[in-house]
Amino acid sequence: MDFGALWLTLRLAVGTTAILLVVALPLAWWIASGRGAGRALVQAVVALPLVLPPTVLGFYLLIALGPLSAPGRLLIKIVGHPLAFSFAGLLVGSVIYSLPFAVQPLVAGFSAVDRGYVEASEGLGVSPWGTFWSVVLPLARGSLLTSTVLTFTHTVGEFGVVLMLGGNIPGATQTLSIALYDQVQEFNYAAANRTALVLVVFAIVALLTIYLLPGVSKADGKRVDVVQ
Amino acid sequence: MESGSTLSNSPSAPLLTVQIEHWLGAMPLDANFSLTQPWTVLFGPSGSGKTTILRSIAGFVRPDSGRIVSRTQVLFDSATKVFVPAHRRPVRCAGQTARLFPHMSVRRNLVYGSGWTSKPADAMGIAEELMVSFGLKEFADRMPDQLSGGEQRRALVARAVIAAITFDGGPEKPLLLLDEPFSGLDIAARDELLVELGAWLARWNIPALSVTHDLGEAFQLNAEVIKIAEGRVVQQGPVAAVLAEERKRLLEQLNVSKGSPA
């Protein structure tokens, strides 16, 4: 078992999930409650990693974060070293690549919250921000869990972007899925088997969390109507 | 109920002035009225535009054109592009369909609006007292889906009243907006609650604008009535004067049905 790769994978997944929660919550609320052309454009950009080959995304990020581009050179100046082929670079790539997995469940969850609850809250003098935290988010908590678990597991299973952007540096940028690839290349099927098993267990535990956790699979934010 | 002269000490500034035009599907809404009495009722048939007027005042509907002024504060003015967002308006609402927050107990629902004010502690005491007079005491710790429709409506009105009492956005109490507050309740329970509500609003000097299509409710309130039909204000005045015709017709119907039991 390659514990270095396991530890790196976990750090990457936790870091990506934490960053994406902060980014995705306001973004998803804006998409769910907004309208107009700007919203469609943002939705398309958010969904892009779903349809692009990961290698394409990884390649552009490699260029953008490296010394060949102006923003890359600026980043190198700020951070002190090139982001490509480093953990920080992996983190940036993962955040972008997993963005749709974080945002889309939240958009679906927020959209399903009856507007009547939002109006009820604002009609009592509570700001949109307060309404979001005390009404919308609790009513969409199922989608919050889905978003978190999907982001985490998707990051654990990442391959293309990590390979392009991180290279394959054991201890620095070699995650489990890439270690598995290496192990198969070396015909070390016993090790590959163990690595694959760890990844399968991750996925099953994650999915069970989504489906089994009490009160989460239940449809949240149902209308409580008197007048039908 | 006595007309509370303390509510508006300068007769030149009514509680609320509404002059709005808005297309409601194929029907033009053209509402033009002022509130001067502590309790005013918008009366009219379903689809006459009452709810849209109320929602425009609350800030949930942006009228096509016109002005809405609360005392001296402009809430909406299409000419100067003023639109105060709902949560900053000096109004507190109880909507037509019960929207108690399903993830909070009745008690937490009731004090919800006051959680963001400077006196959330006061709200707890007020809520306990209000629950007694609204017959909600035994449901305080239940979740909304464990309440009957009528109980939910009581809680909904109580929540708006507490938010109005604990309002700290200015020296005057906000205008309470009630859309069909007691629809679905039986007449005895409704009348009892109207009396309780009236007493609470008088005690705290809270002005109210309610919407109803129920003649009995309008008469029970003995309030100022604004009659709405097809998106326009037909008449405004004391209930006995404005709704005399409707009352006569209703009594005639009752007599007819008494004479020939079906």
Image (cartoon, coloured by chain):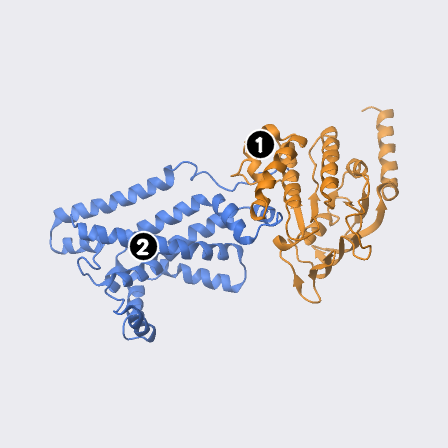
Q: CA distance from mark 2 to mark 1?
A: 42 Å
Chain ID for label 1?
B
Q: Which chain is orange?
A: B
Q: Is residue B110 visible?
A: no
Provide residue A126's location: percent of width, then percent of height: 58, 50
Q: Nearer the viewer, residue A87 or A159?
A: A87
Query: What amino acid does circle 1 point to?
Result: Ala
Disc 2 target residue? A15
Rendering colour (chain A): blue
Residue depth check, mark 2 versus mark 1: number of the one nearer the observer? 1
Same-chain check, marks 2 and 1: no
Q: Element under label 2?
A: helix
How far across and how far down the image is residue A10, in percent?
Answer: 26, 51
Residue that numbered label 1 is attached to: B140
The residue located at (78%, 47%) in the rendering is B6
Residue toward you, B262 or A41: A41
Image location (x, y in percent) of residue B183: 70, 36
> Of helix, strand and loop, which one carries label 1?
loop
- Is residue B261 visible in the rendered structure shown here? yes
Task: Residue at 64% x, 33% y: name it.
Answer: B129
Give the amino acid at mark 2: Gly
Count of picture labels:
2
Instruction: State left or right for residue A145 relative to residue B30.
Output: left
> Could you tell me which quadrant the C terminus of chain B lies in?
top right
